[in-house]
Image (cartoon, rainbow, N blue to C red):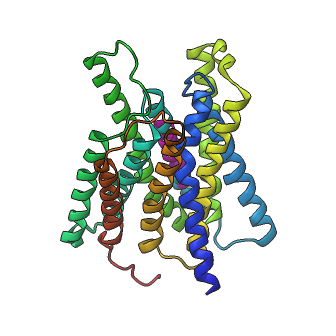
Amino acid sequence: MREIIMVLGSIALTAVCWGVYGPIMRNGQAAMSGSHLLPFIWVGLAYCVIAVVAPAILMRLWGEKGSWTVTGFVWSFVAGVAGALGALGIILAFTYGGSPIYVMPLVFGGAPVVNTFTSMYMSKSYKNASPLFFAGLILVVVGALCVLIFKPSTGPAPGGQGVVSHAVRMLEVGLSIGLTVISWGVYGPILHKGQMLMQGSRLRPLICVGLAYFAVAVVVTAGIIQVIEGSDHWDLMSTTGSLWSFAGGAAGAVGALGIILAFTFGGKPTYVMPLVFGGAPVINTLVTIGPGVANGTIGAISPLFFAGLIIVIAGAATVLVFAPKGAPHGAAK
């Protein structure tokens, strides 16, 4: 009973953290005059604290199975780079006018599909795909279209925005969402590969992810700001925006840690990931529309939008549950 409670608690932790991630990051970006680089830096700093310092302390206190390997470090670091690029895609989507109310559900619906196809490619299990798996894919596509078509208005449209300008903006939002879907989709299988190359260690790959976030989101981004944006761009930094952005990055990192804890306490990917990707969009929607409904700044929400949201969640869960399994590994020599 205790193990079940710990597993469900860890799943709930991840669902809540990843559910509030988008709205929190949107607040941080808004407080920095819409900059997409400055919030990204604070996300990297948050991951450095949560995914590097905390696991290092845990390993020091209690130890952990596995060992450091060069190949395991490389695979896990690459996974961290993918994760950082996915975080940047979220911020870019908000920069181009996207709203968390539909950006995050599309990400949570699309990333599991990419994750599954990446796993199928790495395990060579395409032939094992069942009709229910493909039905899940169709549900994700149909639901995503409903979410985009019937997304609610979060405020008055910018004056003078033409049809072409709006179409360009939506294309930019779509490409940014695509960057996140692909990056976060390949993140899991690549990180799992790194974990296996470290003899099943869970905390060591997480440390590599944190180092990758620091390298991409802090070191590289700071250099880009200095060289391309100019030193004046740092003036957009604000205390409020920094705190919100750091909190968003911390939520993402704690959510990743929640997944690891769920597996550590005996959870299985067959139900852990569907519950996470099913619960996080619900939390995201409630957090996003709550203030707008309360103060009347959000337009009427079509029931078809919620229908699309439910279809996306159901499709993503179906894809994860009925994903083809690779052939079992042979006995170790």
Q: Position of residue 211 (x, y in %)?
A: 64, 46
**Residue closer to the observer: 130 or 316:** 316
Q: Position of residue 232 (x, y in %)?
A: 65, 12
The stretch in magenta equals 76-89
- Left or right of 44 on screen, residue 301: left
- In the current view of this chain or complex, which residue is farthest to the left? 131
Taking the spot 50% from the left edge, 34% from the top edge, the residue there is 91
Taking the spot 45% from the left edge, 66% from the top edge, the residue there is 273
Q: Is residue 72 visible?
A: no
- Please determine whether, in this image, residue 245 is positioned above or below residue 82: above
- Left or right of 173 on screen, residue 236: right
**Residue closer to the observer: 280 or 73:** 280
**Residue closer to the observer: 21 or 114:** 21
Q: Main secondary structure of the magenta part?
A: helix
Query: Which quadrant, please, contains the N terminus?
Result: bottom right
- Please determine whether, in this image, residue 240 is positioned above or below residue 265: above
Q: Position of residue 131 (x, y in %)?
A: 18, 70
Taking the spot 66% from the left edge, 31% from the top edge, the residue there is 241
Residue 79 among magenta residues: yes
**Residue closer to the observer: 27 or 52:** 27
Taking the spot 70% from the left edge, 31% from the top edge, the residue there is 240
Residue 316 among magenta residues: no
- Left or right of 163 on screen, residue 44: right
Q: Is residue 18 visible?
A: yes
Q: Position of residue 303 (x, y in %)?
A: 31, 50
Which quadrant of the figure has residue 34?
top right
